[in-house]
Amino acid sequence: MKKLFTSESVTEGHPDKLCDGISDAIVDEILKSDPYARCAVECCAAYDRLLIMGEVTTSANVDYERIARNTIEKTGYISGSFAYDKCRIDVAVHTQSPDIAMGVDRTDSKDVRDSFGAGDQGMMFGYACRETEELMPLPIALAHRLSARLTEVRKNGTLPYLRPDGKTQVTVEYDGRTPKRIETIVISSQHDSEVTQEKLKEDILTNVIKIVPAELLDENTKYFINPTGRFEIGGPEGDSGLTGRKIIVDTYGGRCAHGGGAFSGKDATKVDRSAAYMARYICKNLVAAGLCDEVELQVAYAIGIARPVSVFVNTFGTGKLGDGEIADIVLKEFDLRPYSIIETLELRKPIFAQTAAYGHFGKEGLPWERLSKVKDLKKYLR
């Protein structure tokens, strides 16, 4: 049966993503000096100003304004009211609440893995499927590629009239759960005042959309490029931005459930981030090992408690074993206590800035994308 599914992505210059980028640049800078720092940093950007706010407990000497201005410049905001050297920056950061720290730093167990409790309550989700080589859903994978390409052709001078802000959207037609073709591609990119809409559309088709596999396109595929026409005013000057407001872009494009917690600006003691990464790691290895072709995993925590309060698996009927059996395997093969997650995925390293744009999943080189548990999982196949 024919079905359509759509996912979107945004460029690193989108105001929300710019805030994510600044937040994660701050986290990485702190972790370089203090791997055990506690960070929960958010940014809000609007017109000509940036507010950096949150809770940080660290021995590192942090120049928040310098980090923010460097990120804004690198992203491409070098003119206008939000230019890196013009915008006003206010910093409102204080130390982590002792009530939260008390739950993470418990000392009532001889095993540090049990003493190290979750930094908050909540549920986190992971997902993997066979639609792409990176075991991600096709719509979000393509949307990210297109938005990353928009930035690439701007920065390398291929389309020098483009500006940092932009969005992409891809609609894929499915036959059952199998992707067949692309129904629609939507691209909106900020640009300077000199380029005509006709040239912009021609250049986007030629230099950006060309990266989409030709076999997925046909004479019925629809293209909407800057469908409202002019898009000269963008970024924080045109719309406010906020850290953590693109959680679906950050994950699986709406394909699976989301617990609601954002990632950027947080150190790994926050299970919103670390447990979501672990859930992706587990799901990817389950699919790669052949235990299923598609899987969604939910884990849930109580603040201050190390072990998850629940683990739920859904393989959408593709499992070689029952979903309950696979959940038992997950609990047996993976240590889901926050301390162990941090150790397994090496999350005290300054690796987070690279995740702030174009998705946290499906990228090469990230520890939660490793297939290091496939051999251990294959033994459960009958």
Image (cartoon, rainbow, N blue to C red):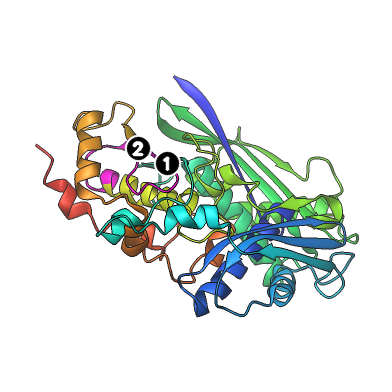
Residue 133 can be seen in this image: no
Residue 298 included in the magenta stretch of the image: yes
Q: Residue at x 48, y 22 (%)?
A: 2
Give the number of the disc on residue 159. none
Q: Residue at x 50, y 38 (%)?
A: 259
SS at badge 2? loop
Residue, disc 1: 302
Q: CA distance from mark 2 to mark 1?
A: 7 Å
Discs 2, 1 touching: Cβ within 8 Å: yes
In the depicted view, which residue is nearer to us: 158 or 231?
231
Residue, disc 2: 309
Q: In the shown orientation, is residue 294 left or right of residue 183?
A: left
Reply above or below: 81 against 306: below
In the depicted view, which residue is nearer to us: 128 or 21?
21
Residue range corresponding to the magenta coloring = 286-310
Question: Residue 62, position in %: x, y?
Answer: 64, 77
Residue 261 can be seen in this image: yes
Q: Quadrant of the C terminus?
A: top left
In the depicted view, which residue is nearer to us: 368 or 12?
368
Q: In the shown orientation, is residue 229 left or right of residue 122?
A: right
